[in-house]
Image (tube, helix red, strand yellow):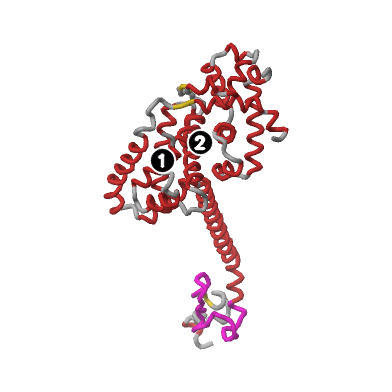
Amino acid sequence: MTDTEVSAEVPEGDLVRRAREGDLTAYDDLVKRYQERIYATIYHMTANHEDANDLAQDSFIKAFSALKSFKGGSSFYTWLYRIAVNKTINFLKQRKNKYHLSLNDLDFNAENDPDLVALISHKTPLRDAGLSELQKKLNEALLKLSDSHRMVVVLHDVQGQSHEDIAEIMGCNIGTVRSRLFYARQQLQGYLAEYVKSV
Amino acid sequence: MNESEQRFDNLRQLLKLKQHEIPPPGYFAGFSSQIISSIKEECVASRPAQTSSSPSWLTQFLSIFDSRPGLLGGLATSMVLFLVLGIVLADHSDNEISANYATDAAMQPSSLLASVNVPAEMPGNDQVSSGGITVSTNPVTSLQPASSLFGQDNSLFQRASYVPAGNASH
């Protein structure tokens, strides 16, 4: 069951209003609606399953306690993302460079993804490298980026968020998002040169 | 697609691998219920404390900073600036007071002279002469003799005149 399938018929605004009044059933629906996306964002930032689990739970709990301050100026989804992103960045600052990769498994569809099949079928180092090895290299390269640059890449290239949404989530302007994205991609291309260049 | 996007096309394809990283099976089955039970526990734990010490307006005020930590930094900076400004102003006014005091002390002899020269009845003068004693609101110059101790016109002192007994007839 995906998060978007949960209570899709109930408008988000109604759920938020009821949750603000202390209705935990409504908040449960909101959690189910966004849990996978919030977890994934944090996971891609930390590259650690346990940390992502703890931070995602903390973010939802914090969001509930701060729900009364939510004025509805932005969507609940963006507001929730902002809390999760700030929590994650604070966590990463405290953790500094003590990374411990505990990567989630790749799903079965990874081997059938046309983009990935195209990459592997070429005569490149990717052909010899297994997907799990590639996954490890990719995560290591991502962790070399600064937190804010990694966040932009994760939100845009992995999660498919728009520049506008990212700007709102990260509290900066669109120009900053674009320049961070460009710089981060440049850096990543350098780190993964042997896999990307010859494709 | 613009040139920048095309330039990073291969990288974006590679990054798609991240979309296939999934948590262990059944991971989200109990996720929301864990969160809800944590919230319930927090509510129960914070209820007695909230009624006794933490007012709701304070909780609401602090919760504003959860989604906007930048505001907290701004508030802290402005408070520090306010404190520094207060210290600077207090220090400045202290210096001014001590400077005024030093000026008063330096002016002391001349003020004595001034009290001699200026008639007590002169309008605008805040010193009032009373039986040769100058009464003033100025704490430093108050109760000073109107003229010097050895002046001729000081009525507090009378010149002693001693005439020996033998010379009384002269």
Which residue does the numbered mark 1 point to in the structure image? A6
Task: Residue A18: tell me if it is visible.
Answer: yes
Task: Residue A101: tell me if it is visible.
Answer: no
Instruction: Give the residue type at disc 2.
Output: Ile
Query: Foreground: B167 or A13?
Result: A13
Label 2's element? helix
- Residue at image x 46%, y 27%? B22
Instruction: Give the residue type at disc 1.
Output: Val
Q: In this view, does B98 lie above or below A83?
A: below
Tag count: 2
Residue B55's label in the rendered image is none
Label 1's element? loop
Q: Which residue lies furthest to the top in this view?
A: A128
Query: Foreground: A22 or B103?
Result: A22
Whether the magenta-drawn stretch holds residue B135 is answered as yes
Query: Foreground: B44 or B2?
Result: B2
Q: Residues within 10 Å of mark 1 (few under 14, many from 20)?
A: some
Residue B118 screen position, x and y as percent = 61, 80
Residue A135 screen position, x and y as percent = 53, 20
Q: Give the range drawn in magenta.
A: B115-142
Numbered disc in front, either 2 or 1: 1
- Residue at image x 63%, y 31%? A184
